[in-house]
Image (cartoon, coloured by chain):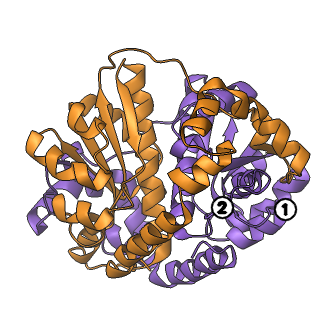
Chain colours: A orange, B purple
Amino acid sequence: MNDIISAASRASTTGNMQLYSIIVTRSQEMKEKLSPFHFNQPMIKSAPIVLTFCADLNRFVKWCEINNAIPGYDNFQSFTAAMLDTTIIAQAFCDEAESRGLGICYLGTTTYNAKDIIDTLALPKRVIPITTITVGYPADIPPQVERLPLEAFVHNEVYCDYDEKMIKSLYSEKESLEANQKFVKENNKETLAQVFTDIRYTKNNNEVFSKKFIDVLKENNFL
Amino acid sequence: MNDIISAASRASTTGNMQLYSIIVTRSQEMKEKLSPFHFNQPMIKSAPIVLTFCADLNRFVKWCEINNAIPGYDNFQSFTAAMLDTTIIAQAFCDEAESRGLGICYLGTTTYNAKDIIDTLALPKRVIPITTITVGYPADIPPQVERLPLEAFVHNEVYCDYDEKMIKSLYSEKESLEANQKFVKENNKETLAQVFTDIRYTKNNNEVFSKKFIDVLKENNFL
Protein backbone atom coordinates (compact mmCIF):
# COMPACT_ATOMS: atom_id res chain seq x y z
CA MET A 1 0.00 0.00 0.00
CA ASN A 2 2.83 2.40 0.87
CA ASP A 3 4.54 1.72 -2.47
CA ILE A 4 1.34 2.46 -4.36
CA ILE A 5 0.56 5.64 -2.42
CA SER A 6 4.17 6.76 -2.79
CA ALA A 7 4.01 6.27 -6.57
CA ALA A 8 0.65 8.09 -6.69
CA SER A 9 2.10 11.03 -4.78
CA ARG A 10 4.32 11.66 -7.82
CA ALA A 11 1.20 12.91 -9.63
CA SER A 12 0.90 16.65 -10.29
CA THR A 13 -0.12 18.90 -7.42
CA THR A 14 -0.86 22.64 -7.30
CA GLY A 15 2.44 24.46 -6.71
CA ASN A 16 3.76 21.24 -5.11
CA MET A 17 1.67 22.06 -2.04
CA GLN A 18 0.15 18.54 -1.84
CA LEU A 19 -3.14 19.81 -0.47
CA TYR A 20 -4.49 16.38 0.53
CA SER A 21 -4.51 13.71 3.19
CA ILE A 22 -5.45 10.04 2.88
CA ILE A 23 -7.14 8.23 5.75
CA VAL A 24 -6.55 4.48 5.61
CA THR A 25 -9.31 2.37 7.17
CA ARG A 26 -8.49 -1.27 7.88
CA SER A 27 -10.28 -1.96 11.17
CA GLN A 28 -13.71 -3.56 11.13
CA GLU A 29 -14.84 -1.12 13.80
CA MET A 30 -14.12 1.94 11.65
CA LYS A 31 -15.66 0.31 8.57
CA GLU A 32 -18.86 -0.28 10.56
CA LYS A 33 -18.87 3.38 11.56
CA LEU A 34 -18.29 4.67 8.02
CA SER A 35 -20.73 2.30 6.34
CA PRO A 36 -24.03 4.16 7.00
CA PHE A 37 -22.58 7.42 5.64
CA HIS A 38 -22.04 5.59 2.35
CA PHE A 39 -25.63 4.29 2.48
CA ASN A 40 -24.34 0.84 3.49
CA GLN A 41 -22.89 0.07 0.09
CA PRO A 42 -21.40 -3.40 0.71
CA MET A 43 -17.87 -2.58 -0.51
CA ILE A 44 -17.06 -0.65 2.66
CA LYS A 45 -17.31 -3.73 4.85
CA SER A 46 -16.20 -6.34 2.32
CA ALA A 47 -13.05 -4.64 0.96
CA PRO A 48 -9.87 -5.09 3.02
CA ILE A 49 -8.93 -1.42 2.74
CA VAL A 50 -10.98 1.76 2.49
CA LEU A 51 -9.22 5.01 1.63
CA THR A 52 -10.82 8.39 2.25
CA PHE A 53 -9.13 11.08 0.16
CA CYS A 54 -9.45 14.51 1.77
CA ALA A 55 -8.77 18.04 0.58
CA ASP A 56 -6.37 19.26 3.28
CA LEU A 57 -5.40 22.88 3.90
CA ASN A 58 -4.84 22.27 7.62
CA ARG A 59 -1.27 21.01 7.24
CA PHE A 60 -0.25 23.74 4.81
CA VAL A 61 -1.78 26.50 6.95
CA LYS A 62 0.00 25.16 10.05
CA TRP A 63 3.30 25.11 8.13
CA CYS A 64 2.73 28.75 7.11
CA GLU A 65 1.87 29.83 10.64
CA ILE A 66 5.00 28.39 12.24
CA ASN A 67 7.10 29.95 9.48
CA ASN A 68 6.08 33.54 10.02
CA ALA A 69 3.90 33.49 6.88
CA ILE A 70 0.30 34.69 6.91
CA PRO A 71 -1.87 32.12 5.10
CA GLY A 72 -4.71 33.35 2.88
CA TYR A 73 -6.40 30.04 2.18
CA ASP A 74 -9.83 30.41 3.76
CA ASN A 75 -11.57 30.79 0.43
CA PHE A 76 -13.18 28.85 -2.40
CA GLN A 77 -10.22 29.02 -4.80
CA SER A 78 -7.97 27.35 -2.24
CA PHE A 79 -10.58 24.65 -1.66
CA THR A 80 -10.87 24.16 -5.43
CA ALA A 81 -7.10 23.69 -5.73
CA ALA A 82 -7.16 21.20 -2.85
CA MET A 83 -10.09 19.31 -4.38
CA LEU A 84 -8.17 19.05 -7.66
CA ASP A 85 -5.00 17.86 -5.90
CA THR A 86 -7.03 15.30 -3.96
CA THR A 87 -8.86 13.87 -6.96
CA ILE A 88 -5.64 13.74 -8.98
CA ILE A 89 -3.84 11.65 -6.36
CA ALA A 90 -6.94 9.47 -5.94
CA GLN A 91 -6.99 8.58 -9.63
CA ALA A 92 -3.19 8.20 -9.76
CA PHE A 93 -3.62 5.74 -6.88
CA CYS A 94 -6.27 3.80 -8.86
CA ASP A 95 -4.13 3.61 -12.00
CA GLU A 96 -1.13 2.40 -9.99
CA ALA A 97 -3.18 -0.10 -7.96
CA GLU A 98 -4.85 -1.55 -11.07
CA SER A 99 -1.49 -1.87 -12.81
CA ARG A 100 -0.47 -4.12 -9.90
CA GLY A 101 -3.52 -6.37 -10.19
CA LEU A 102 -5.66 -4.77 -7.50
CA GLY A 103 -9.27 -3.76 -8.01
CA ILE A 104 -10.75 -0.43 -6.93
CA CYS A 105 -14.20 1.05 -6.46
CA TYR A 106 -14.97 4.74 -6.01
CA LEU A 107 -17.75 5.69 -3.60
CA GLY A 108 -19.38 8.83 -4.93
CA THR A 109 -21.24 9.28 -1.65
CA THR A 110 -18.37 10.93 0.23
CA THR A 111 -19.46 14.54 -0.22
CA TYR A 112 -23.10 13.66 0.59
CA ASN A 113 -22.38 13.01 4.24
CA ALA A 114 -19.13 14.91 4.56
CA LYS A 115 -19.94 16.18 8.06
CA ASP A 116 -20.49 12.70 9.45
CA ILE A 117 -17.29 11.45 7.83
CA ILE A 118 -15.41 14.44 9.28
CA ASP A 119 -16.62 13.49 12.76
CA THR A 120 -15.89 9.79 12.32
CA LEU A 121 -12.36 10.25 11.00
CA ALA A 122 -11.59 13.13 13.40
CA LEU A 123 -10.81 15.52 10.55
CA PRO A 124 -9.80 18.95 11.87
CA LYS A 125 -10.92 22.27 10.41
CA ARG A 126 -9.90 22.81 6.76
CA VAL A 127 -9.93 19.08 5.94
CA ILE A 128 -12.83 17.97 3.72
CA PRO A 129 -13.47 14.40 2.53
CA ILE A 130 -13.78 14.38 -1.27
CA THR A 131 -13.88 10.78 -2.41
CA THR A 132 -13.52 7.25 -1.05
CA ILE A 133 -11.89 4.28 -2.74
CA THR A 134 -12.20 0.67 -1.66
CA VAL A 135 -9.27 -1.57 -2.62
CA GLY A 136 -8.63 -5.29 -2.77
CA TYR A 137 -7.68 -8.17 -5.01
CA PRO A 138 -10.65 -8.67 -7.33
CA ALA A 139 -12.62 -11.92 -7.08
CA ASP A 140 -13.02 -11.86 -10.85
CA ILE A 141 -12.58 -9.57 -13.84
CA PRO A 142 -16.09 -8.43 -14.83
CA PRO A 143 -16.81 -7.32 -18.40
CA GLN A 144 -16.35 -3.59 -18.97
CA VAL A 145 -19.47 -1.47 -18.87
CA GLU A 146 -20.29 0.77 -21.81
CA ARG A 147 -18.97 4.26 -22.42
CA LEU A 148 -20.25 6.92 -24.80
CA PRO A 149 -18.39 7.13 -28.12
CA LEU A 150 -15.49 9.61 -28.14
CA GLU A 151 -17.37 12.10 -30.32
CA ALA A 152 -19.87 12.48 -27.47
CA PHE A 153 -17.35 14.24 -25.24
CA VAL A 154 -14.35 15.32 -27.35
CA HIS A 155 -14.63 18.66 -29.13
CA ASN A 156 -12.15 20.18 -31.58
CA GLU A 157 -11.13 23.81 -30.99
CA VAL A 158 -14.55 24.91 -29.73
CA TYR A 159 -17.50 23.19 -28.06
CA CYS A 160 -19.87 21.71 -30.58
CA ASP A 161 -23.25 21.85 -28.88
CA TYR A 162 -25.71 18.98 -29.32
CA ASP A 163 -29.06 19.00 -31.07
CA GLU A 164 -31.72 16.37 -30.48
CA LYS A 165 -30.59 14.23 -33.38
CA MET A 166 -26.98 14.15 -32.12
CA ILE A 167 -28.00 13.26 -28.58
CA LYS A 168 -30.19 10.43 -29.85
CA SER A 169 -27.39 9.07 -31.98
CA LEU A 170 -24.71 9.36 -29.28
CA TYR A 171 -26.86 7.64 -26.62
CA SER A 172 -28.49 5.03 -28.87
CA GLU A 173 -26.01 2.25 -28.16
CA LYS A 174 -26.22 2.84 -24.40
CA GLU A 175 -30.02 2.83 -24.48
CA SER A 176 -30.20 -0.34 -26.56
CA LEU A 177 -28.02 -2.45 -24.25
CA GLU A 178 -29.92 -5.33 -22.67
CA ALA A 179 -28.67 -4.45 -19.18
CA ASN A 180 -29.96 -0.89 -19.49
CA GLN A 181 -33.30 -1.94 -20.96
CA LYS A 182 -33.71 -4.34 -18.03
CA PHE A 183 -32.89 -1.46 -15.71
CA VAL A 184 -35.72 0.63 -17.23
CA LYS A 185 -38.22 -2.23 -16.96
CA GLU A 186 -37.28 -3.20 -13.39
CA ASN A 187 -37.76 0.38 -12.28
CA ASN A 188 -41.06 0.67 -14.10
CA LYS A 189 -39.88 3.63 -16.19
CA GLU A 190 -40.38 4.68 -19.81
CA THR A 191 -36.81 5.76 -20.56
CA LEU A 192 -33.30 5.16 -19.21
CA ALA A 193 -32.96 8.88 -18.47
CA GLN A 194 -35.95 8.63 -16.10
CA VAL A 195 -34.07 6.01 -14.06
CA PHE A 196 -31.48 8.70 -13.40
CA THR A 197 -33.81 11.65 -12.77
CA ASP A 198 -36.50 9.78 -10.81
CA ILE A 199 -34.51 7.17 -8.90
CA ARG A 200 -30.72 7.36 -8.93
CA TYR A 201 -29.96 11.10 -8.88
CA THR A 202 -33.14 12.92 -7.99
CA LYS A 203 -33.57 16.68 -7.78
CA ASN A 204 -34.67 16.41 -4.17
CA ASN A 205 -31.67 14.35 -3.05
CA ASN A 206 -29.27 16.55 -5.01
CA GLU A 207 -30.68 19.65 -3.34
CA VAL A 208 -30.58 18.16 0.16
CA PHE A 209 -26.97 17.02 -0.23
CA SER A 210 -25.95 20.27 -1.92
CA LYS A 211 -27.12 22.20 1.10
CA LYS A 212 -25.32 19.84 3.49
CA PHE A 213 -22.03 20.06 1.57
CA ILE A 214 -22.26 23.85 1.18
CA ASP A 215 -22.79 24.09 4.95
CA VAL A 216 -19.62 22.05 5.52
CA LEU A 217 -17.65 24.34 3.21
CA LYS A 218 -19.04 27.41 4.98
CA GLU A 219 -18.17 26.04 8.43
CA ASN A 220 -14.62 25.64 7.15
CA ASN A 221 -14.54 29.18 5.69
CA PHE A 222 -14.13 27.85 2.14
CA LEU A 223 -17.39 29.47 1.04
CA MET B 1 -4.66 11.07 -29.04
CA ASN B 2 -7.96 9.26 -29.60
CA ASP B 3 -6.49 6.01 -28.28
CA ILE B 4 -5.29 7.74 -25.12
CA ILE B 5 -8.57 9.57 -24.51
CA SER B 6 -10.48 6.39 -25.20
CA ALA B 7 -8.40 4.47 -22.64
CA ALA B 8 -8.81 7.32 -20.13
CA SER B 9 -12.59 7.25 -20.58
CA ARG B 10 -12.51 3.79 -18.98
CA ALA B 11 -11.80 5.50 -15.65
CA SER B 12 -14.57 5.57 -13.05
CA THR B 13 -17.40 8.07 -13.49
CA THR B 14 -20.37 8.92 -11.26
CA GLY B 15 -23.20 6.52 -12.14
CA ASN B 16 -21.60 6.11 -15.59
CA MET B 17 -22.95 9.57 -16.49
CA GLN B 18 -19.59 10.80 -17.86
CA LEU B 19 -20.20 14.37 -16.76
CA TYR B 20 -17.33 15.87 -18.74
CA SER B 21 -16.20 17.20 -22.08
CA ILE B 22 -12.68 17.66 -23.41
CA ILE B 23 -11.85 20.54 -25.73
CA VAL B 24 -8.81 19.80 -27.90
CA THR B 25 -6.82 22.87 -28.96
CA ARG B 26 -4.31 22.39 -31.79
CA SER B 27 -4.58 25.64 -33.75
CA GLN B 28 -2.13 28.43 -33.10
CA GLU B 29 -4.98 30.91 -33.23
CA MET B 30 -6.86 29.29 -30.36
CA LYS B 31 -3.67 28.87 -28.33
CA GLU B 32 -3.01 32.61 -28.70
CA LYS B 33 -6.52 33.33 -27.48
CA LEU B 34 -6.28 31.01 -24.47
CA SER B 35 -2.78 32.07 -23.46
CA PRO B 36 -3.57 35.27 -21.50
CA PHE B 37 -6.21 33.47 -19.41
CA HIS B 38 -3.42 31.18 -18.23
CA PHE B 39 -1.23 34.21 -17.48
CA ASN B 40 0.84 33.51 -20.61
CA GLN B 41 2.50 30.44 -19.18
CA PRO B 42 4.69 29.36 -22.11
CA MET B 43 3.40 25.76 -22.31
CA ILE B 44 0.15 26.87 -23.94
CA LYS B 45 1.88 28.10 -27.07
CA SER B 46 4.83 25.69 -27.10
CA ALA B 47 2.97 22.39 -26.58
CA PRO B 48 1.45 20.81 -29.69
CA ILE B 49 -1.81 20.02 -27.93
CA VAL B 50 -3.75 21.75 -25.16
CA LEU B 51 -6.68 19.96 -23.57
CA THR B 52 -9.29 21.79 -21.52
CA PHE B 53 -11.20 19.37 -19.30
CA CYS B 54 -14.69 20.65 -18.50
CA ALA B 55 -17.38 19.59 -16.04
CA ASP B 56 -20.33 19.07 -18.38
CA LEU B 57 -23.96 18.75 -17.30
CA ASN B 58 -25.23 20.23 -20.58
CA ARG B 59 -25.13 16.96 -22.52
CA PHE B 60 -26.71 14.93 -19.73
CA VAL B 61 -29.49 17.47 -19.14
CA LYS B 62 -30.26 17.57 -22.89
CA TRP B 63 -30.44 13.77 -22.94
CA CYS B 64 -32.89 13.85 -20.01
CA GLU B 65 -35.04 16.52 -21.62
CA ILE B 66 -35.51 14.67 -24.90
CA ASN B 67 -36.30 11.48 -22.97
CA ASN B 68 -39.24 12.80 -21.00
CA ALA B 69 -37.15 12.96 -17.82
CA ILE B 70 -37.04 16.05 -15.61
CA PRO B 71 -33.41 16.81 -14.74
CA GLY B 72 -32.57 18.07 -11.25
CA TYR B 73 -28.95 18.99 -11.79
CA ASP B 74 -28.86 22.74 -11.27
CA ASN B 75 -27.18 22.44 -7.88
CA PHE B 76 -23.80 22.19 -6.17
CA GLN B 77 -23.86 18.43 -5.61
CA SER B 78 -24.26 17.81 -9.35
CA PHE B 79 -21.41 20.21 -10.09
CA THR B 80 -19.27 18.42 -7.48
CA ALA B 81 -19.94 15.06 -9.15
CA ALA B 82 -19.07 16.54 -12.55
CA MET B 83 -15.88 18.12 -11.19
CA LEU B 84 -14.85 14.73 -9.77
CA ASP B 85 -15.62 12.94 -13.05
CA THR B 86 -13.66 15.58 -14.96
CA THR B 87 -10.57 15.46 -12.75
CA ILE B 88 -10.60 11.65 -12.74
CA ILE B 89 -10.55 11.43 -16.54
CA ALA B 90 -7.90 14.18 -16.67
CA GLN B 91 -5.53 12.22 -14.43
CA ALA B 92 -6.36 8.92 -16.19
CA PHE B 93 -5.39 10.71 -19.41
CA CYS B 94 -2.06 11.80 -17.86
CA ASP B 95 -1.21 8.32 -16.61
CA GLU B 96 -2.02 6.80 -19.99
CA ALA B 97 -0.14 9.51 -21.92
CA GLU B 98 2.95 9.21 -19.74
CA SER B 99 2.92 5.42 -20.07
CA ARG B 100 3.23 6.00 -23.84
CA GLY B 101 6.23 8.33 -23.49
CA LEU B 102 4.39 11.63 -23.70
CA GLY B 103 4.90 14.45 -21.22
CA ILE B 104 2.11 16.43 -19.59
CA CYS B 105 1.74 19.65 -17.65
CA TYR B 106 -1.32 20.71 -15.67
CA LEU B 107 -2.28 24.38 -15.72
CA GLY B 108 -3.84 25.19 -12.37
CA THR B 109 -5.04 28.52 -13.70
CA THR B 110 -8.16 27.18 -15.43
CA THR B 111 -10.68 28.03 -12.70
CA TYR B 112 -9.12 31.49 -12.18
CA ASN B 113 -10.37 32.81 -15.50
CA ALA B 114 -13.16 30.33 -16.13
CA LYS B 115 -15.49 32.94 -17.61
CA ASP B 116 -12.96 34.00 -20.27
CA ILE B 117 -12.23 30.38 -21.14
CA ILE B 118 -15.98 29.69 -21.40
CA ASP B 119 -16.30 32.53 -23.91
CA THR B 120 -13.21 31.52 -25.89
CA LEU B 121 -14.16 27.84 -26.20
CA ALA B 122 -17.88 28.62 -26.75
CA LEU B 123 -18.90 26.55 -23.74
CA PRO B 124 -22.68 26.54 -23.28
CA LYS B 125 -24.50 26.86 -19.97
CA ARG B 126 -23.71 24.06 -17.47
CA VAL B 127 -20.20 23.50 -18.87
CA ILE B 128 -17.38 24.71 -16.60
CA PRO B 129 -13.65 24.44 -17.37
CA ILE B 130 -11.90 22.67 -14.49
CA THR B 131 -8.34 21.99 -15.54
CA THR B 132 -6.06 22.24 -18.56
CA ILE B 133 -3.33 19.84 -19.63
CA THR B 134 -0.65 20.51 -22.21
CA VAL B 135 0.73 17.43 -23.97
CA GLY B 136 3.74 16.65 -26.13
CA TYR B 137 6.84 14.53 -26.44
CA PRO B 138 9.21 15.76 -23.74
CA ALA B 139 12.48 17.41 -24.81
CA ASP B 140 14.18 15.73 -21.88
CA ILE B 141 13.41 13.87 -18.67
CA PRO B 142 13.98 16.35 -15.82
CA PRO B 143 14.81 15.08 -12.31
CA GLN B 144 11.77 14.56 -10.10
CA VAL B 145 10.92 17.35 -7.70
CA GLU B 146 10.55 16.59 -4.01
CA ARG B 147 7.45 15.30 -2.28
CA LEU B 148 6.64 15.21 1.42
CA PRO B 149 7.29 11.89 3.15
CA LEU B 150 4.28 9.54 3.23
CA GLU B 151 3.72 10.08 6.96
CA ALA B 152 2.97 13.72 6.17
CA PHE B 153 -0.28 12.85 4.39
CA VAL B 154 -1.23 9.25 5.22
CA HIS B 155 -3.20 8.68 8.42
CA ASN B 156 -4.21 5.35 9.94
CA GLU B 157 -7.86 4.94 11.01
CA VAL B 158 -8.24 8.57 12.16
CA TYR B 159 -6.57 11.87 11.29
CA CYS B 160 -3.47 12.46 13.36
CA ASP B 161 -3.24 16.23 13.66
CA TYR B 162 0.15 17.94 13.52
CA ASP B 163 1.95 19.82 16.23
CA GLU B 164 4.76 22.27 15.56
CA LYS B 165 7.47 19.66 16.05
CA MET B 166 5.84 17.28 13.51
CA ILE B 167 5.38 20.02 10.91
CA LYS B 168 9.02 21.06 11.27
CA SER B 169 10.19 17.49 10.88
CA LEU B 170 7.93 16.69 7.90
CA TYR B 171 8.92 19.85 5.98
CA SER B 172 12.62 19.92 6.94
CA GLU B 173 13.86 18.07 3.86
CA LYS B 174 11.80 20.29 1.55
CA GLU B 175 13.06 23.45 3.24
CA SER B 176 16.69 22.36 3.13
CA LEU B 177 16.78 21.65 -0.62
CA GLU B 178 19.13 23.97 -2.49
CA ALA B 179 16.50 24.83 -5.10
CA ASN B 180 14.03 25.90 -2.41
CA GLN B 181 16.61 27.89 -0.46
CA LYS B 182 17.50 29.69 -3.69
CA PHE B 183 13.79 30.37 -4.20
CA VAL B 184 13.59 32.04 -0.76
CA LYS B 185 16.67 34.16 -1.39
CA GLU B 186 15.67 35.25 -4.91
CA ASN B 187 12.32 36.40 -3.60
CA ASN B 188 13.90 38.22 -0.69
CA LYS B 189 11.92 36.25 1.89
CA GLU B 190 12.75 34.77 5.29
CA THR B 191 11.04 31.41 4.88
CA LEU B 192 9.86 29.14 2.06
CA ALA B 193 6.29 29.42 3.36
CA GLN B 194 6.43 33.19 2.78
CA VAL B 195 7.16 32.58 -0.89
CA PHE B 196 3.77 30.86 -1.05
CA THR B 197 1.77 33.30 1.06
CA ASP B 198 3.35 36.55 -0.18
CA ILE B 199 4.08 35.76 -3.83
CA ARG B 200 2.73 32.57 -5.33
CA TYR B 201 -0.69 32.11 -3.70
CA THR B 202 -1.61 35.36 -2.00
CA LYS B 203 -4.74 35.99 0.03
CA ASN B 204 -5.73 38.84 -2.25
CA ASN B 205 -5.42 36.81 -5.47
CA ASN B 206 -7.18 33.84 -3.90
CA GLU B 207 -10.07 36.05 -2.85
CA VAL B 208 -10.37 37.78 -6.23
CA PHE B 209 -10.39 34.47 -8.12
CA SER B 210 -12.72 32.85 -5.58
CA LYS B 211 -15.28 35.53 -6.25
CA LYS B 212 -14.89 35.18 -10.02
CA PHE B 213 -15.29 31.39 -9.93
CA ILE B 214 -18.24 31.54 -7.52
CA ASP B 215 -19.91 34.02 -9.91
CA VAL B 216 -19.44 31.56 -12.78
CA LEU B 217 -21.00 28.75 -10.73
CA LYS B 218 -23.91 31.01 -9.77
CA GLU B 219 -24.52 32.06 -13.38
CA ASN B 220 -24.76 28.37 -14.21
CA ASN B 221 -27.14 27.67 -11.28
CA PHE B 222 -24.62 25.37 -9.60
CA LEU B 223 -24.47 27.60 -6.52
Q: Which amino acid does label 2 sit on?
A: Pro
Q: Nearer the viewer, residue B74 or A101?
A: B74
Q: In this view, does A211 lie to the left or right of A216?
A: right
Q: Name the residue under label 1.
A: B122
Residue A32 appears at what percent x and percent y? 15, 46
Q: Quadrant of residue A1?
A: top left
Q: Nearer the viewer, residue B50 or B197?
A: B50
Residue B122 appears at what percent x and percent y? 84, 62
Tags 1 and 2 on a common chain? yes
Q: Which amino acid does label 1 sit on?
A: Ala
Q: Residue at x 36, y 55 (%)?
A: A110
> Label 1: chain?
B
Residue A199 appears at what percent x and percent y? 52, 52
Residue B118 appears at what percent x and percent y? 76, 66
> Are the residues tagged 1 and 2 within 8 Å (C-beta)?
no
- Using the rendered image of the protein, determine whether residue B140 is visible from the camera's viewpoint: no
Task: Between label 1 and label 2, give the one nearer the viewer.
Answer: 2
Q: Which residue is drawn at 69% across and 56% down?
A: B69
Q: Residue at x 27, y 29 (%)?
A: A3
Q: In which quarter of the image is residue A135?
A: top left
Q: Is residue A197 left or right of residue A96?
A: right
> Label 2: chain?
B
Q: Name the residue under label 2.
A: B71
In the image as oriented, which residue stretches furthest toward the front?
A188
Using the image, determine if residue B163 lies above or below residue A33: below
Sequence-wise, which precedes: disc 1 or disc 2? 2
Using the image, determine if residue A170 lies above or below residue A88: above
